[in-house]
Amino acid sequence: MRSIDTMLEDCIGNGRYQAAIISLVLLVGIPAAFMQTATVFIAALPDARCWIEAVDNDTASDVLSEDVIKSALIPYDEIAQRYDRCHMFNYNLTGCEGNLNISQCVDDVTNSTSPNIGDCQDGHHFSRDIFESTVATEWDLLCGRLTLKSGSTSVFYFGVLAGSIIGGALSDRFGRILIYKIGLLAGLVVGIAVAFSPNYYVFSLLRFLLALLFKPASLAAVVYALEVSRERWKTTAALGYNIVYGLGCVIMSGLAIFWRNWRPLQIAFSLGFLPLVLTSFFLPESPRWLVSKEKFVEADKTLKLMRKRNHAKGVVDLNTERDLAPVAADKREVNKKDGNSLIETFSRPYSRMMTINNMFVWMITSLVYYGISLNSGALAGNIYVNHALGGVMEFAACSLCIVAISRFGCRNWTVITLVLCGLSCLLSTIALHVGAGVTAIKYIGLVLAMSGRFGSSAAFAVLYVHTVELFPTSGRNTALGLASMAARIDSIITPFTLQIQYQVPWLTQAIFGFTALAAACVAYSFPETKDNSLLMTFNETEKYFEKNLRSSKMAKIYCISGKRDRDPDEASVDEEDALANEKL
């Protein structure tokens, strides 16, 4: 009997068709970048101050410069090192309205009155130097309404969480390509609908639906790429989505420069789905999925198509039902024996510890990654250049991971990149605090922030690979699902973490720095999986974790150090596990 891996290798030939379909599905990373970081541009918060009717009406606004208005009528925030966005001096400027010499009138009032500082009464005046219109400027999402801006982004990531939970189950049941097609079409339609939102609440609801419906497509694309790739391409395929995602960040900066109004920009982002919708009809279903559903006739047709398109040489007898039906039966028996994967994972002490620690590292990496990604506008320099640089860092980090994983191993590379990320964030905090107002120091902070983006991007990418290698076939999807869920929970919190910087500018980066270093310490306790075979069963995995972690400090923290009690049923199934492994 031959395995599905052997059959795929027989069909790949020159590999050009395989490379083409893998590249095609992974291009979904471009619209994914558009949707997940769209708020950097469509919900950007430009420089703002209180609207003051006497000086902001059509007549006066052409007479008084912005600098004069701020210096005379707006208090200066020493902590944030800028003019206050939420308060104004309560001068009575009623007599200045319509005055031909409004400049002199304002001078007379401000020099003869000692005002109190009060809240903005008539909304805000937003700078139009960078953006013509954003969600924040259109619906005045500033000061007391700033939480609404953060809440909208959190609602979107809650949709990503929900889509991640249902996405795996949907693609496992209905097929990778069907879910991929539906998700792309939904992304196109709902994404365009977002641009016509009449108010904040409809905008937030549509963004939630966009994330919920599109996320399963991106998950299906990554799984598909892994399932149709040859063995030596798998690491590249696993990281390919993140590499393309970085490219998407660069492209969206170019689009945002061209469209400065958020509504046409949102439409432009959504049209990124259209080419993928059209090309999705040329993609064959995954042979692995077809075999898992025992659709052997369709699997044979797909393999023959791949063999033909790849110009594979020689004569090969492809009969998946003959060769793989017994294997499918063995897998059913192993899954039946292992039972519920969630219960099996948490009922074993070392597996439970590793699962919780893995979820923690994913959570922190997600917090830092999305925090830095969505914070381009708060960095020194141009927001368009900053976001594009972030995309370049993502592209470079994930490309380097392909080489670094094979050389350093997943655990070591995760620790290295998280330490880089943590130190970069902390040093940028120091630069911000010490060099407040110094342009050169601000740009040093930008360089450090980009180093943090590089580290968080690399760590996030390698965690996918490491999680697959740490956990057994019987519970691998469960481990990935739990880790992804933990990451999405923290991405929901991230917008509110960013909001802190409007009150205490240095605190957000300090949070990112210290938590990244904490995650690096936890990741260092993980076993190294370099050059190891993939684990198959829960019992095998538990023994592997115990062997590597029994004397570790982390095991002592969890109070499970030393020799664990052996499951009375475990010894009796060891031989069965070995036999199942050999068959699989």
Image: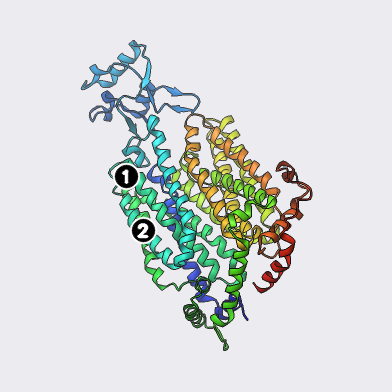
Q: In this view, does 530 lie to the left or right of 10?
A: right
Residue 154: mark: none
Against 119, residue 338 (above or below) is: below
Q: Where is residue 141 in the image (x, y as percent from the top left)?
A: 36, 35
Q: Which of 126 and 277 is in front in this view?
A: 277
Q: For the point 51% across and 62% down, which residue is it?
A: 222
Q: Position of residue 143 (x, y in %)?
A: 39, 30
Q: In this view, does 274 lie to the left or right of 567?
A: left
Disc 1 marks a residue whose amino acid type is Val
Q: Which of marks 2 and 1 is nearer the N terminus?
A: 2
Against 408, residue 287 (above or below) is: below
Q: Is mark 2 on a helix, strand or loop?
A: helix
Q: Is residue 385 left or right of residue 425?
A: left
Disc 2 marks a residue whose amino acid type is Ala
Q: How far apart are marks 2 and 1 (CA)?
A: 17 Å
Task: Indicate how the structure is coloured in the image.
Answer: rainbow
Residue 252 seen anywhere in this rendered image of the structure:
no
Q: Nearer the viewer, residue 332 or 123?
A: 332
Q: Name the residue under label 2.
A: 186
Q: Where is residue 463 in the image (x, y as percent from the top left)?
A: 60, 54
Q: In this view, does 492 lie to the left or right of 546?
A: left
Q: Name the residue under label 1.
A: 202
Q: Position of residue 519 (x, y in %)?
A: 64, 44
Q: Nearer the viewer, residue 128 or 120?
A: 120
- Outermost residue on the front side: it is 568
